[in-house]
Image (cartoon, grey):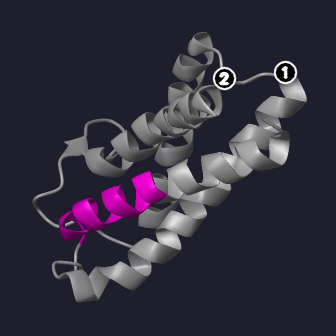
Amino acid sequence: MNKVRYITTLAIVAFVLHIIWENVQAPLFAGYQSFSQHFSMCLIGTIGDVVITLSVLAFLWLLKKDVTQPADFLGLAIIGFVIAVGIEQNALLADKWNYNSAMPIIPWLNVGLAPILQMTLLLPLSFYLARLIKINK
């Protein structure tokens, strides 16, 4: 599979995973209880998530040629965690969004658990699923 096909596959996989997660977790944020209140914001967030995923891919390609080995997935989870914590802390400080009382908060980091799990889990899962699709084609 060439790089363009892999990038396209990764982008589509990441988009599908993130649009679902964004919409499922949206009611944990203040002011986003109904689908009509949050879908457009979730779509924008998902586009950002895909950009982050592809940026991580580009960065890793600078470091090593192949980023689809099983050992890479733990590294991707760590990268996803760090990125998510940074995004959440900055957004909360800038008052871009707030959580409602249903959001579990990670002690010491003071960020919501759901958005941290999102990037921590979905970043490596996106790479893994894109790899599976690559193998099966």
Name which residue lies at 28% across and 48% down: 114
Q: Position of residue 131 (x, y in %)?
A: 60, 30
Q: Return the mark for residue 68.
A: 2
Choose between 136 and 56: the one closer to the eye: 136
* Residue 123, image x, y percentages: 52, 39
Let me know if residue 37 appears in the view. yes
Which secondary structure type mostly characterizes the magenta part of the structure?
helix
Task: Please say whether residue 96 is visible from this viewpoint.
Answer: no
Q: Position of 42 compared to 74: left or right?
A: left
Q: Residue at x 16, y 78 (%)?
A: 33
For the point 20% across and 63% down, which residue is it? 28
Residue 93: percent from left, percent from top? 46, 64
Which numbered tag is attached to residue 96? Answer: none
Examine the rendered structure and indicate whether residue 15 appears above or below residue 132.
Answer: below
Is disc 1 placed on a helix, strand or loop? loop
**Secondary structure beneath label 2:** loop
Amino acid type at image mark 1: Lys
Could you say which quadrant of the image residue 47 lies in? bottom right
Q: Position of residue 85 (x, y in %)?
A: 47, 44
Q: Is residue 133 above or below residue 30?
A: above
Query: Which residue in the structure is indicated by mark 1?
Result: 64
